[in-house]
Image: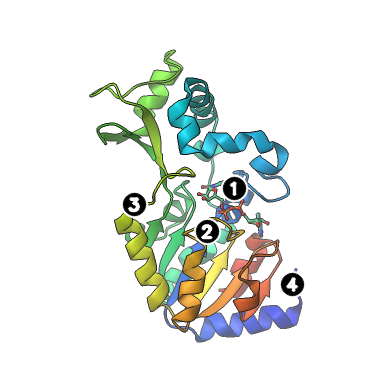
Amino acid sequence: MDSAEELRRARELVTGAGHIVAMTGAGVSTDSGIPDFRGPNGVWTKNPGAERMSNLSAYVGSRQVREEVWQARVRHPGWAARPNAAHHALAELERSGRLAAIVTQNIDGLHQRAGSAPERVVELHGTMFDTVCLGCGDRRDMREALDRVAAGETDPPCLLCGGILKSATISFGQALDAKVLHRAKEHAQACDLMLVAGSSLTVHPAAGLVGLAASAGATVVVCNASETPYDDQAAAVLRGPLGEVLPALV
Ligand code: NAD
């Protein structure tokens, strides 16, 4: 756990803020059994070769990559995951009336399942619960594609146009939805405190929202087990496990 002094300071800042925006990453969901990418048990830490599965040009250019991605999607721990104490703490902060939004890089829907209002959750990197056709844009429930994979289609094409089907998530090399990014920027500029939780803050433009909030005058509190490039802009940095830190903060 963090030094009592640092925790006390962070708590004072959170308690004194009236318009908090949380910026969350994969670290809030590790206690729910979904590994992050870059933490000690991260998917890429253990298997650097897995990075290509999150790359748009590799996905579009290789049927083999798509087949691997569909197999991984079927087995994704997110289907069975349940929200943990970190998600519940943020939902609690929202009920107190001071958390205006959660801008999340996560695709697992666990904030909403913990009780955070869906309209207050900005999913910067999309959701694993839908598919989208890269050709015609047709959007559907992921269940349908997973059923097709289970029935033997190793790379199910779009049922409307035959195009490449993909989860409705943002891969590296893929642009974020402009409207979603715009909303996230508005939240970053409007908050008086940005609470970062469980992100290495290395993926852009998501990470840049922290700098945007800071330059608009917000106080930044970083809760993350390892260092981030924004720690020196933070008024408090907590390294303890999020399942303890976030409940203690709120
Ligand atoms: P990241 O893997 O780069 O960083 C996660 C950070 O969380 C690490 O620095 C790690 O030290 C910290 N962390 C992990 N567990 C923690 C815990 N219990 N307590 C405190 N700190 C903890 O993740 P990122 O910054 O979110 O960026 C990775 C990208 O991967 C994002 O684009 C995201 O969309 C995607 N992703 C999402 C999920 C998910 O939806 N759950 C899972 C993996 C990756």
CA separation, marks 1 and 4? 22 Å
Query: Is the residue indicated by label 3 positioned so its CB lies within 8 Å of ligand 1?
Result: no
User: What residue sits right under mark 1 in the picture?
Assistant: 32
Residue 155: horizontal and vertical position, in percent? Answer: 43, 20
User: What residue sits right under mark 2 in the picture?
Assistant: 87
Of label 1 and label 4, which has the lower sequence position?
4
Of label 3 and label 2, which has the lower sequence position?
2
For the residues labelled 1 and 4, say whether their Cβ atoms are less than 8 Å apart.
Answer: no
Looking at the picture, tell me which residue is in the foreground, 91 or 221.
221
Of label 1 and label 2, which has the lower sequence position?
1
Label 3 environment density (alpha carbons within 10 Å; few <14, some 14–19, many ≥20): few
Residue 208: horizontal and vertical position, in percent? Answer: 49, 66
The relative height of residue 8 versus residue 243 in the rendered view (above or below) is below
CA separation, marks 1 and 3? 27 Å
User: What residue sits right under mark 3 in the picture?
Assistant: 177
Residue 83: horizontal and vertical position, in percent? Answer: 53, 51
Q: Secondary structure at mark 4?
A: loop
Q: Amino acid at mark 3?
A: Asp
CA separation, marks 3 and 2? 24 Å
Of label 2 and label 4, which has the lower sequence position?
4
